[in-house]
Amino acid sequence: MQPKKTNLGIVRPVRQEAPNLDYIGGAVASLRGAFESGLTRSYAWRVSQLDAMVRMLKAEDTALCEALQRDLNKPRIEAFVTELNEVIAGAHYLKQNLKKWMKPQKVSTPLVLQPGKSWIQSEPLGVALVISAWNYPVLLSLAPMLGAIAAGNAAILKPSELAPATSTLLARLCAQYLDRRALTVIEGGIPETTALLAQKFDHIFYTGNGTVGRIVMKAAAEHLTPVTLELGGKSPCIVDQHADLEVAAKRIAWAKFFNCGQTCVAPDYVLVHEQVHDRFLDLLTATLKQFWGDDPAKSPDYCRIVNGRHHWRLTDLIEGSGRVVVGGQSDAASLYIAPTVLRDVPDDAPAMSEEIFGPILPVIKVASIDEATRRINARPKPLALYLFTNNDANQQRVLNNTSSGAAVINHAVIHLGVQGLPFGGVGESGMGAYHGKHSFDTFSHKKAVLKRATVLEPDLMYPPYSDTKEKWLRRLV
Ligand code: NAD
């Protein structure tokens, strides 16, 4: 295999022999047949599949946690809280509300079109393709699938090849628990995804980096297929002089370093007011020790980097990106990188030039909240923005003067747990959103329906036109 460097600096192997991918067209055609038969449209089918998903997650909890442990050394509790339980909660929420969302939504009809009724009818799009990423391989695969199911679609899931144990297990479990006629998993990497993208889908839901996001969007354009792109970027975190510093240090340490920083909405870097900068660093250092001990390599509660290529990319970022306050140790053999905090990080340092997506946290001193927002606005719009302050004016200033997929005040990452909030990016961090009603809407077409009665048929709108008709129309419209 010849290694190939991507735009993200990630080296991926390139296969020499092209695999036989003829089965992919057949799989898509078979799902389309199932969709066109009407199988997936009924409320009963949708609920049965949401229930089956919950049954699968509960019955296969141990197997799924073991697969996540093999792929990412993910601690059981993190696997349950951030992946399995999130999908279960999402399925329950969809089921609770589905009947209401499926009902036609009435809108008013103007006088000139009376007697008549107008409504919006949600209908499934057809066959959806879900392409997911490796860092939360259960959540990022199954949560979009829930949306596709709730909206009445057939769907193909393509999990990430970089979490192979989870990918293989999901393929087996989905075939065992879900309705195989309409829901299927196709495993594989670039060749399989490329072959899938050549097919016509009715929606493509992609999670991953922006470079591949562009490939997905170009392929979708060939068929005029709508896309949802759940991308990443550098999510900033501001700590001002009015913040509760102990709480901020604890919450930021947790949000940044669980899953070894391999979280799309992890705080990427921290902008701290100069008055509290040193105290914040002391508290952060103490919190890391409290969470993972003197040697996090020995902690059973600390994840590992997904593979050697990302390990190499991340250790490169530490070198030449400022002073290490804490951490910096790494071991390529065990894919370990200690929780690492950097200070005095220049704007052009490697750690500030790309999304970190690992356990490295640059902490940057700023003189004011306005300097913080200026720095944020100088970069592409992030997936999330975090602000730690108890000052209401500063909260409003940051909310009103920045743009991000989401914003959280005095915490980080936890907005994912609010089913009512849309989850998605803006600008380079993505397009479209999901979770709760937003998942249902993403995989639905909102059909506009107008029904006229036939009892009255005035000639008002029809030629030949006259001054009298115009006079009446001007009154009525
Ligand atoms: P990845 O390597 O698992 O790739 C994602 C998917 O793209 C995989 O299924 C993979 O097979 C496919 N893929 C890769 N190269 C391809 C190609 N050339 N053509 C077609 N398909 C291809 O994951 P990643 O991209 O390393 O994920 C990390 C990125 O994703 C980060 O930027 C992170 O912030 C972002 N992310 C975003 C979210 C979100 O919900 N917004 C969640 C997780 C990760």
Image (cartoon, grey):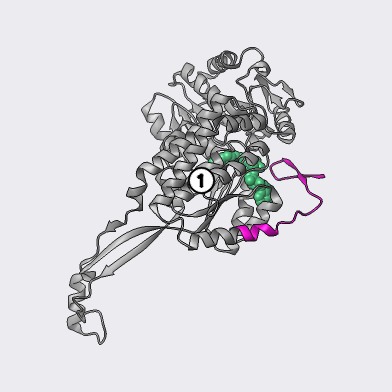
Query: In which of the image's four quarters is ligand 1 placed?
Result: top right
Q: Where is 149 relative to 476, above or below?
A: above
Image quadrant occupied by the C terminus: bottom left
Judge by depth and name the residue closer to the eye, 73 or 115. Answer: 73
Q: Residue at x 62, y 13 (%)?
A: 293
Which residue position is annotated with label 1?
A: 144
Query: Which secondary structure, mark 1?
Result: helix
Q: Residues within 10 Å of mark 1 (few under 14, many from 20)?
A: many
Q: Quadrant of residue 341?
A: top right
Task: Give how far across and how far down residue 123 sits, in percent.
Answer: 41, 58
Q: Compare residues 15 and 430 and report the one nearer the observer.
A: 15
The total of numbered circles placed on residues is 1
Residue 321 x, y percent position in the rendering: 69, 28
Rendered-image quadrant of the N terminus: top right
Which residue is depicted at the point 53% across and 62% down?
33
Q: Please, is residue 6 above or below residue 315 in the view? A: below
Residue 245 visible in rendering:
yes
The region drawn magenta spans: 1-27
Instruction: Confirm whether the magenta stretch covers residue 2.
Output: yes
Where does the image place residue 128, in percent across and percent down from the top left?
Answer: 53, 54
Q: Residue at x 46, y 19 (%)?
A: 247
- The amino acid sitting under disc 1 is Pro
Q: Position of residue 244 (x, y in %)?
A: 44, 19
Q: Is residue 346 visible?
A: no
**Left or right of residue 148: residue 329:** right
**446 and 467: which is toward the camera:** 446
Say if 326 sits above or below 29 in the image: above
